[in-house]
């Protein structure tokens, strides 16, 4: 199982690592109940792991063409109605700027992250906390996870 299964931009992923990463995606999707996931980003090895993990969980994976205009991306999301949107690093700012056009129920996951930092669980919230101008209040999202701890990460 130490043979390389995937080579991408200098990262080598063995079959064992690939299986573990796909299992992490599967577990997070199973636990969250997310059955429909979308990916907005360029080609990557992580997108392939999302695709296989969603299939293993019995879900549907929809890659969104990164060359589309923000309004076109919003229309695809409106039509597909994903539970989660995984966003490649090139598009974090674009999604943040255009979040007003996206449904409130939609959960976002910023990609890529190192495999050891991949989420083991995904929590869906009914509504994202925002200020009067619509900016996401990240501290409010993090607050329940840091209660009772001396040191917090913001």
Image: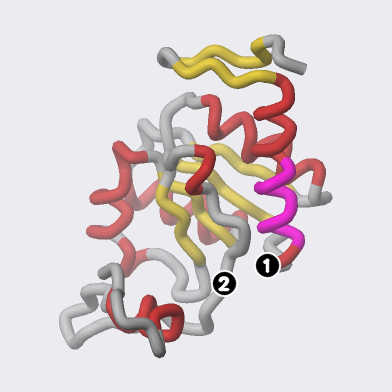
Q: Quadrant of residue 45?
A: top right
Q: Residues within 10 Å of mark 1 (few under 14, many from 20)?
A: some
Residue 117 x, y percent position in the rendering: 48, 48
Dot 2: what SS?
Answer: loop
Dot 1: what SS?
Answer: helix
Magenta stretch encompasses residue 26:
yes
Residue extending farthest to the front is 150
Q: Is residue 89 above or below residue 4?
A: below
Residue 126 x, y percent position in the rendering: 52, 83
Indicate which disc residue 32 carries. 1
Indicate which disc residue 18 carries. none
Q: Is residue 148 above or below residue 98?
A: below
Query: Residue at (42%, 55%) from the top-left corner?
Result: 74
Left or right position of 145 against 94: right
Quadrant of the rendering where the C terminus is positioned = bottom left
Query: Residue at (52%, 74%) from the top-left corner?
Result: 105
Query: Residue at (49%, 26%) from the top-left corner?
Result: 44
Left or right position of 90 against 114: left
Left or right position of 113 against 4: left
Query: Residue at (67%, 57%) from the top-left corner?
Result: 28
Q: Which residue is mark 2?
A: 123
Mark before the other along the chain sequence, 2 or 1: 1
């Amino acid at each position: 199982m130490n043979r390389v299964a995937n080579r991408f931009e200098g990262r080598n992923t063995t079959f064992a690592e690939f299986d573990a990463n796909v299992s992490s995606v599967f577990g997070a999707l199973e636990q969250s109940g997310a059955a429909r996931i979308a990916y907005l980003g360029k080609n990557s090895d992580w997108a392939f792991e999302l695709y296989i993990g969603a299939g293993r969980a019995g879900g549907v994976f929809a890659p969104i063409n990164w060359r589309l205009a923000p309004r076109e991306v919003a229309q695809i999301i409106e039509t597909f109605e994903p539970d989660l949107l995984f966003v490649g690093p090139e598009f974090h700012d674009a999604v943040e700027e255009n979040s007003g056009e996206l449904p409130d129920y939609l959960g976002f996951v910023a990609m890529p992250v190192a495999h050891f930092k991949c989420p083991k669980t995904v929590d869906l919230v009914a509504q994202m906390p925002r200020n009067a101008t619509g900016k996401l209040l990240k501290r409010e999202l993090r607050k329940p996870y840091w209660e009772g701890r001396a040191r917090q990460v913001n």
